[in-house]
Amino acid sequence: MKPKVLIIDDDEEIRTQMKWAVAANHEVAVAADRRSAVDTFRKQRPEVVLLDLGLPPNPNDTSEGMATLAALLTLDRAAKIIIISGQSDRENAVKAIGAGAYDFLCKPLDLGQLNLLLQRCVYVSKLERDYRRMQDEERPDMFEGMLGGSETMQEVFKIISKVAKSNVPVLILGESGTGKEMVANAIHRRSSFKAGPFIAINCNAIPENLIESELFGYEKGAFTGANSQRVGLIETAAGGTLFLDEIGDLPPPLQVKLLRFLQEKRIQRVGGRQEIEVEARVLAATHVDLAKALEAGRFREDLYFRLAVIACKLPPLRERGDDILLLAKDFLKRFGTQNGRDGLAFSPQASQAIAGHSWAGNVRELQNRIQRAVVMADDQKITEADLELESPAHPSTSQGTPNGAARCGGLTAASGLKEAREHLEREMVALAIERHGGNISAAAKELGISRPTFYELMGKLGISKA
């Protein structure tokens, strides 16, 4: 079959010209605005998109084109989107590249250059798909792009394989940074909804006064500033998978509306009276303790049981044993290649520091530290200093310690591993707060974790801000 191309431009003459230029080697679809573009993309899943940034209702600026770019990347983050722009819009085209577009071409179009770029996009897209498939087939510790040879992660992979075949809701549990969205993506790719979009919504990232209209959409005139109808993210997920991340932070009034959608598969846009049927697979995730949220009345029990038909718990990185170094080496190779620094390796001390670190920010923190180290390291050997980790402590004997047990910060070598880790975490968190004068955002950034995770750690370790 010919690869599919979607052309998005409000100028019919230009659409016709581009369609004529690429139709010999591609199956071509066209759209003139954001809504029709999103609908067509969702149904046809083209390999490549040609997108003009000047679209109605604001053809004289790039706002609608950038919104269309964001909407398409929400449907498929690996989509190859080529921006078509005038010479005067070159700066905006570069901004679009930063927002996730693959490349751009300036008008008037060189049709030979256009076909070469399309050929490259299709080739890269095929390589990416083949690479993911080969990883899964050749490496037993690789599953749908996730790396994990530990027993706990192998169990997670088994759960994904089983639940993907059904249509039941799944609740993914785990600390921030453990890879909950990757699990949701894996379930989607193995499900009967894989041909549809994967729509991820972070319930904690959208302001409370906007989240209802973002989820359910709104009708024209529903409130001040609603100058046109807008399709919500739930409706956009039709035929695919809806992933509700940080569901524990969803405001109580919206929990009622979400429960109704889960029960009836119908929604109403804000300001609308017509019910809209939406068939989508629903997955949810949270890092908070929903049992405590239920007791405190912050989360509805009926919604919890609707979402948690099957629960999948992800282990924190510190409990994944040899996976820590396995992931670290994979990140080092990947970021080294991206930055033109192939052949990088960890020093023995760096490997020990990685294995012994508590990783409060989990995989996200590991990735962050290694990415920084690749950029900042002066030599081919990545050191513990490049990773901003301390050298592993070397136990020493002491006459004042029973049986010659080594002491470190008040802990003996006989102390439990869990106790030692908590002691180290408490020390790191307290020092970070002190260094930044009580500024939690700055302290969290230093440790490579989010503010909610930092507050969660403070509570677990009994640390107050004062």
Image (cartoon, rainbow, N blue to C red):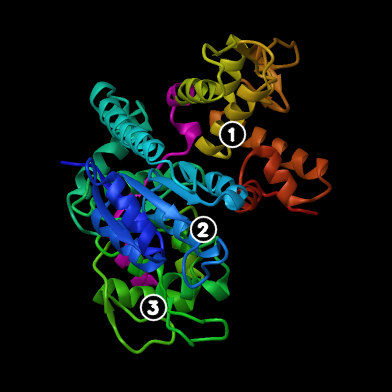
**Nearer the observer, 378 or 2:** 2
Mark 3, residue position = 257
- Contact between marks 3 and 2 (CB within 8 A): the answer is no
Instruction: Judge left or right: residue 296 versus residue 265.
Output: right
Residue under the point 65% across and 15% down: 383
Is 323 magenta? The answer is yes
Q: Distance between the Cα atoms at labels 1 and 2? A: 28 Å
Instruction: Classify 400 as above or below 458.
Output: above
Q: Secondary structure at mark 3?
A: helix
Mark 1, residue position = 368
Asked if residue 227 can be seen in this view, the reply is yes
Which circle's residue, 1 or 3, is located before the other in the chain?
3
Residue under the point 15% across and 41% down: 1
Which label sits on residue 66? 2
Rendering coords of residue 161 (x, y %): 22, 42
Instruction: Classify 188 as above or below 268.
Output: above
Instruction: Judge left or right: residue 388 versus residue 76.
Output: right
Name the residue type under label 3: Lys
Name the residue type under label 1: Asn
Residues in magenta?
300-326
Name the residue type under label 2: Met
Q: Secondary structure at mark 1?
A: helix
- Contact between marks 1 and 2 (CB within 8 A): the answer is no
Is 399 magenta? The answer is no
Q: Distance between the Cα atoms at labels 1 and 3? A: 37 Å
